[in-house]
Amino acid sequence: MSILVVSDFSEGSFRASSTRAAVAAANRIDGNVDLLIAGKGARAASDAAAKLHGVTRVLAADSDSLDHLSPETLASQVLAVASNYTHIFFALGFLNRAAMPRVAAKLGVSPLTEISDVIDASTFKRAIYAGGVITTVKTSGAPVVASVRTTSFEAAADDGAASVEDLAPVEAFAKNTFRSAEIMKSDHPDLLTAKRVVAGGQGLDGEAGFKALEALADKLGAAIGATRVVVDNGLCPNEWQVGQTGKIVAPDLYIAFGISGALQHLAGMMGSKVIVAVNKDPEAPIFDVADYGLVADAASAVEELTKAL
C-alpha cells in the first residue's frame, strides 16, 4: 500500500493540527506514507512536515505560480502523482474540501468525506445526518480518496525523519484569477486548536451579547465560536462558525451560551471533552449532550461569569 496525504497548506500557512490527524489516519494502514505540500512557501514548511511520525517522504511543490492556490490547481497537482498511490487522504481544510471531490471525479471514484476511523484499507467509519449516525463504509474504488476528520484521530507525533523531495509544480488553473484576500487577525487562540472555546447563539441577544462574549474569552484565554444562524445574520465573522458547514472543534472545554443545539451545530463540537450549556429553555436539545447545564439567560450568565473571573 502507498498512501498520499495532502497537507492543509494555503496562503503560505502550514496547518499542523489537521495535517497531523490525516497522517495519523494514514498510519492505520500498512504501507508507505508520503506527504504532499503544494503552494508558494511549501519548501520552507517541509522541515516541520518531515518530522511527522510515519511519513516516509515529503513532496514539496513550491513555485511563485502556486501562490494563492486554487482548488483546481491543487487537484491537478495531486492528480499528477495520483497513479503512484492506493490511497489519497486529504487533511481537512477549506482548500482541500474543494479539491478533494475534483480529484475523485477525475479518478472515477466516489470520495469519502470526513472519515472518523480506519477499520482496514478499504473500510472506514464516517458520520452522516449531521453526526447523528455513524456508518461503516466499505469501498471497492481505487484509489481510495477521502478527507479526514481532524478531531477523530490523535495527532501524529514529531518523532519522524522523512526525506524531502522537490516536486515539479503544475500550471495554475488559467480560468481563475486571484483578486484579493482578506485574512482575519485575532488576539484569541485559533478555533481549531484551542483548548477552551466559548460559543454563542441567538440567545446572546445581538451585538452587545457577543461583545461581552469576547471579554469572557479574553479572561479565559479561549477561542470564540458561533452558530450558523448568528453568522448568517452578520453578528459574527465566518471564521467563528462551528458546525457541519463550519469548523469541527474538540477542545477540553466548550461552553455554549444561548445555543439551542441544532444537529448542524452539534456535529461540529461533539468531540469536546467537557460541554457546558447555558440556555433559558430547559427543553433545549443542547442539554442532552452537555456534561453540565445551567437554565439561565445566556447574556446575563456571560456578564456574571466575566465579573467572577
Image (spheres, rainbow, N blue to C red):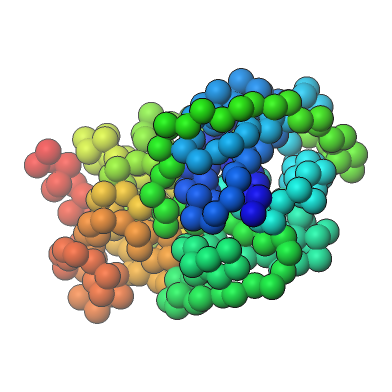
Q: In this rendering, would 280 be left or right of 143? A: left
Rendered view: 183 above or below 262: above
Q: Quadrant of residue 95?
A: top right
| Residue 264 placement, left or right of 74 | left
- Residue furthest out toward the left: 308
Image quadrant containing the C terminus: top left
Between 281 and 159, the residue placed more toward the observer is 159
Figure check: 142 above or below 89: below
Residue at 64%, 54% in the rendered image: 1
Closer-to-camera residue (266/209): 266
Q: 108 left or right of 274?
A: right
x then y, percent, for residue 261: 35, 69
Whether residue 246 is visible? no
Residue 139 in the image: above or below residue 73: below
Q: Residue at x 61, y 20 (%)?
A: 44
Q: Position of residue 106 (x, y in %)?
A: 83, 59
Residue 265 rendering spot, x and y as whole percentages: 42, 64
Q: Is residue 114 visible?
A: yes
At x 45%, y 71%, the residue is 131
Q: Of residues 25 and 105, which is closer to you in this image? A: 25
Question: Where is residue 57, by image quadrant?
Answer: top right
Residue 303 percent across, percent down from the top left: 18, 47
Q: How many marks?
A: 0
**Residue at (63% x, 41% y) in the render:** 34
